[in-house]
Amino acid sequence: MRGRHLLAGLGLAGALALGAPTAAAAHDSLTGSSPSAESTVETVDEIELTFSNVLLELGANQRSTAIQVRQDDRYFETGCPVLSDRTVSAPVALGGAGDYEVIWQVVSSDGHPTSGTYTFTYAPAEGTPAAEGSASPACSKAAAESGGQEDVLLLGAAAAVVALAAVGVLVAVLLSRRRSASAARAEDAAPSPSE
Ligand SMILES: [Cu+2]
């Protein structure tokens, strides 16, 4: 298993080096969840996922970590996921009875992003108030705002480096051209008859 994992890691490194989109292989696995997969529950105020190893926090606001709880294109998580060692949890306020899909993404202890989904069934007591949910994931806006800014800064720095390199090349080219042009002029002292 270790050898296979190493090979998967090398494959991922290769894919990263080539700039190809990375696919999740087998990493730290989900060992338990609350509510558990395929279970029927009467009350839920939090999704808690437990993994086989201590997860990594990457990026501002842990935007590499996500928990979404979905039913019919509406999202019922009410905040961003909180990561603590092997567990990730997110608060939820569910709507009507029925099946809910939990969509999760974490960064495995070996640095690889990994994700999955499972469903559970919500069967609240009669008269339990139902939340409306949201048309978009609760955490995406905050993550996009801070993360977007960070990305812009990184892109700006990368662009500055590229621009400096380009200026350097341009100066070198101009200098060598001027040098060869003046050398040619010195050799060919008579003005050219054309034009
Ligand atoms: Cu891995």
Image (cartoon, rainbow, N blue to C red):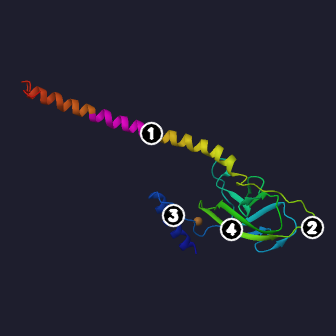
Q: Nearer the viewer, residue 141 or 149?
A: 141
Placement of 90 over or under 149, stated as above or below? below
Give the Cα separation between the discs numbered 3 and 1: 27 Å
Give the labeled residue for mark 1: 161
Give the Cα separation between the discs numbered 4 and 3: 22 Å
Numbered range of the magenta stretch: 161-173
Task: Using the image, tell me which numbered label, if any, was put on residue 12.
Answer: 3
**Quick check: 115 left or right of 126?**
left
Magenta run includes residue 64:
no
**Quick check: 113 left or right of 172?**
right
Mark 1 Cβ inside 8 Å of ligand 1: no
First reached walking from the N terminus: tag 3 or tag 1: 3
Magenta run includes residue 164:
yes
Secondary structure that dominates the magenta span? helix
Q: Quadrant of the C terminus?
A: top left
Q: Residue at x 92, y 67 (%)?
A: 126
The x, y position of residue 17, in whole percent, is 45, 58
Q: Residues within 10 Å of mark 3 (few under 14, many from 20)?
A: some
Give the Cα separation between the discs numbered 2 and 1: 62 Å
Which tag is nearer the camera, tag 1 or tag 4? 4
Mark 3 Cβ inside 8 Å of ligand 1: yes
The x, y position of residue 144, in whole percent, is 64, 47
Which tag is nearer the camera, tag 2 or tag 1? 2
Give the labeled residue for mark 4: 117
Label 1 element class? helix
